[in-house]
Image: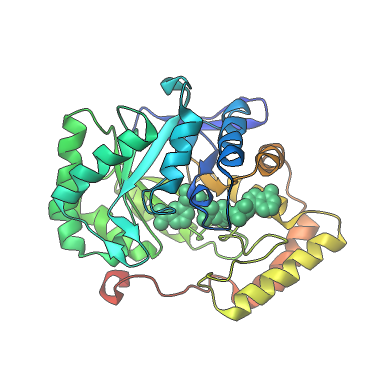
């Protein structure tokens, strides 16, 4: 995978596409107030800071805050050169238990997202959390609807996202995809994505990584109340934060460096709705890993390593 560097950020191609993106991506879920209320102006500042510091790829969904994240992002991107960023959007998930993978909804959804985001095209559209859908419908209806939108020039590339890697692999085995987005599977806690990388490589699908902080669990503040991980996982993460604090290192920095150093993905999306977090993440994402500290944190997290939680229809999670 050929790379390049500009300031504190490195760039990698999304293999099989003409896209080249920063290894640290801006994840817009928190702009939908997923981790607590984010003031509109603060959210806009965080996006602008990320772009100013060399982050070039953004992930969003109409699900995040029931369209609020897209609206805030649209405000942030107003007046920004459209060639300065790669925009990845989503279709199919609209609420905690609200899914619609039909072709008609896909077409309406993309048009509505384009309007909120203030752009004429999405560089990537991903079917959001496929494990909650009927995978045959995803393959035979949702993805063909997105292919038609690609032919119409509204979207440039097509992918799927989800938590169980088996579900992503099953769709990749039955349809032509540009990308899969996996989350919480290449972190200090869970490295199972690495075991699946050959499957996606063989199918010619590029992999995007998300949630290097395990959706807040790998932060000093700790996991949000809705976090789906078992309580023991959350407790071990809190212990890891204490180990880092004793050594004067932020767990967030160790976790981010660890994920971003993985070469098997084009980018790693992190949620950072605060300008200070953006600055500290861009500054801290690249750099040597403290091997002693990593070993100590590994020991603390070993009892829960690769522990997952249920997500979606059980039949979709069978490899
Ligand atoms: P994350 O692991 O990136 O953690 C985000 C949390 O960490 C937020 O509360 C943020 O404020 C906090 N944080 C970030 N930097 C920090 C720092 N330096 N110090 C202290 N706290 C810090 O989780 P995420 O945001 O859910 O995931 C990243 C992105 O990946 C999402 O925003 C979304 O775009 C994407 N994603 C997609 C899917 C999907 O498609 N199914 C699922 C998960 C995530």
Residue 214 sits in quarter: bottom right
Q: Residue at x 50, y 60 (%)?
A: 185
Q: Residue at x 77, y 54 (%)?
A: 250
Residue 90 lies, with reference to residue 308, above or below; the image says above
Residue 266 lies, with reference to residue 138, above or below; the image says above
Q: Nearer the viewer, residue 140 or 3?
A: 140
Coloration of the structure image: rainbow
Q: Nearer the viewer, residue 274 or 52?
A: 274
Residue 169 lies, with reference to residue 272, above or below; the image says below
**What percent of the width, then of the height, locates residue 224?**
59, 66
**What percent of the width, then of the height, locates residue 169?**
31, 58
Q: Nearer the viewer, residue 39 or 5?
A: 39
Q: Residue at x 27, y 61 (%)?
A: 99
Q: Residue at x 36, y 42 (%)?
A: 89
Q: Is residue 312 left or right of residue 210?
A: left
Q: How many labels, in total?
A: 0
**What percent of the width, then of the height, locates residue 116?**
36, 37
The C terminus sits in image quarter: bottom left
Residue 128 sits in quarter: bottom left
**What percent of the width, then of the height, locates residue 38?**
58, 49
Q: Is residue 13 visible?
A: no
Q: Is residue 206 visible?
A: yes
Residue 18 sits in quarter: top left
């Amino acid at each position: 995978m050929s790379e390049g560097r500009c300031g504190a950020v490195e760039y990698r191609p999304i293999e099989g596409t003409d896209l080249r993106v920063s290894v640290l991506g801006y994840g817009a879920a928190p702009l939908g107030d997923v981790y607590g209320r984010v003031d509109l102006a603060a959210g806009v500042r965080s996006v602008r800071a990320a772009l100013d510091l060399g982050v070039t790829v953004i992930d969003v969904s109409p699900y995040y805050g029931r369209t609020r994240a897209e609206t805030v992002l649209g405000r942030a991107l107003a007046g920004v050169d459209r060639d300065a960023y790669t925009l990845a959007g989503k279709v199919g998930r609209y609420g905690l238990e609200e899914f619609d993978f039909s072709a008609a909804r896909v077409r309406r959804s993309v048009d509505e997202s384009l309007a909120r985001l203030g752009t004429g095209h999405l560089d990537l559209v991903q079917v959001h959390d496929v494990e909650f859908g009927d995978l045959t419908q995803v393959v035979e209806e949702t993805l063909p609807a997105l292919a038609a939108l690609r032919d119409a020039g509204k979207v440039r590339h097509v992918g799927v996202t989800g938590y169980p890697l088996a579900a992503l692999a099953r769709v990749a085995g039955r349809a032509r995809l540009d990308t899969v987005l996996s989350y919480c599977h290449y972190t200090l806690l869970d490295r199972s994505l690495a075991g699946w990388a050959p499957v996606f490589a063989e199918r010619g699908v590029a992999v995007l990584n998300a949630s290097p902080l395990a959706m807040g669990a790998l932060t000093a503040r700790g996991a949000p109340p809705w976090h789906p991980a078992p309580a023991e996982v959350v407790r071990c993460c809190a212990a890891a934060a204490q180990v880092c604090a004793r050594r004067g290192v932020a767990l967030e920095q160790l976790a981010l460096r660890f994920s971003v150093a993985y070469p098997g993905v084009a980018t790693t999306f992190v949620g950072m709705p605060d300008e200070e977090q953006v600055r500290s993440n861009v500054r801290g994402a690249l750099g040597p890993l403290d091997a002693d500290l990593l070993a100590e944190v590994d020991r603390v997290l070993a009892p829960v390593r690769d522990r997952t939680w249920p997500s979606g229809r059980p039949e979709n999670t069978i490899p």
